[in-house]
Amino acid sequence: MPQDAGRSTGIVTTTRVTHASPAGNYAHTAERHWESDNDVEDYNADPDACDDIAEQLVLGNTGSKIKVIMGGGRKKFLPKDAIDPEGETSGRRKDDKNLIDTWINQKNLLGTNSYVWNRDQLFTVDTANTDYLLDVDNGGLETS
């Protein structure tokens, strides 16, 4: 694994970053649709017994070390009562975790980071002085 060799890793996708294809790089789950804790409950499983894919991306051993994350699926990271930055879509998480804020707080301790959610913001990122980048927009074939 590149991370084990001290190399930087990243995920860039046109779908949700929690979709089964990109998630295969950092998550282990019994069901490919367990993208948020709410999704785990939809399958009558216990989200306390199995971390969902978004949580594994932010808090997991492999996911938390990924330096560049770009794709869709923002609502999988936000609590149900949250309104996204565009003021439109509420989150999907029942556990009240805001995994975007968690990511930002963790990366602030490790170096400089940038969280963006649109094209204009992405173009303003100072890549020479950014150690971690999270670009999770509302795109990526968003479904529930």
Image (cartoon, grey):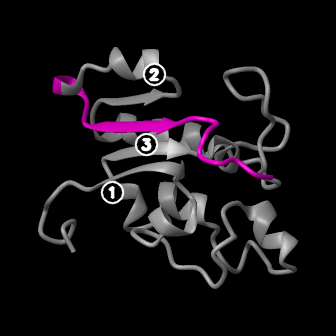
Tell me residue 16's x, y (percent).
57, 52
Which residue in the protein does label 3 denote?
A: 70
Q: Which residue is mark 1?
A: 65
Q: Which comes sooner in the sequence, label 2 or label 1?
A: 1
Residue 42 image-quadrant placement: bottom right
Q: Amino acid at mark 3?
A: Met
Up the image or down, 70 lies above or below 65; here it is above
Q: Position of residue 101 (x, y in %)?
A: 57, 37
Q: Does residue 100 appear left or right of residue 80 in this picture?
A: left
Q: Measured along the vertical axis of the image, is residue 99 above or below residue 115?
A: below
* Residue ID at (40%, 46%): 69
- Between tags 2 and 1, which lies in front? 2
* Magenta segment includes 135: yes
Segment tinted magenta in the rendering? 128-144
Query: Marks 3 and 1, how far apart in space?
Result: 14 Å
Query: How many dots with numbers?
Result: 3
Please give the name of the residue rendered at 39% of the width and 23% of the height, measured from the top-left corner. 122
Classify 104 as above or below 32: above
| Three-letter residue code for mark 2 | Arg
Gap between marks 2 and 3 measured at Cα: 11 Å
Side (left or right) of 102 relative to 121? right
Say left or right for 65 vs 121: left
**Eyeballing the image, is 46 above or below 64?**
below
> Which kind of residue does numbered mark 1 sit on?
Lys
* Residue drawn at point x = 44 percent, y = 15 percent: 120
| Mark 3 or mark 1, whichever is nearer to me | 3
Which of the 4 image quarters holds residue 1?
Answer: bottom left
Q: Position of residue 52 (x, y in %)?
A: 64, 67
**Element carrying mark 2:** helix
> Percent x, y for residue 46?
79, 78
What residue is disc 2 on?
Answer: 119
Between the C-alphas of marks 2 and 1, the distance is 24 Å
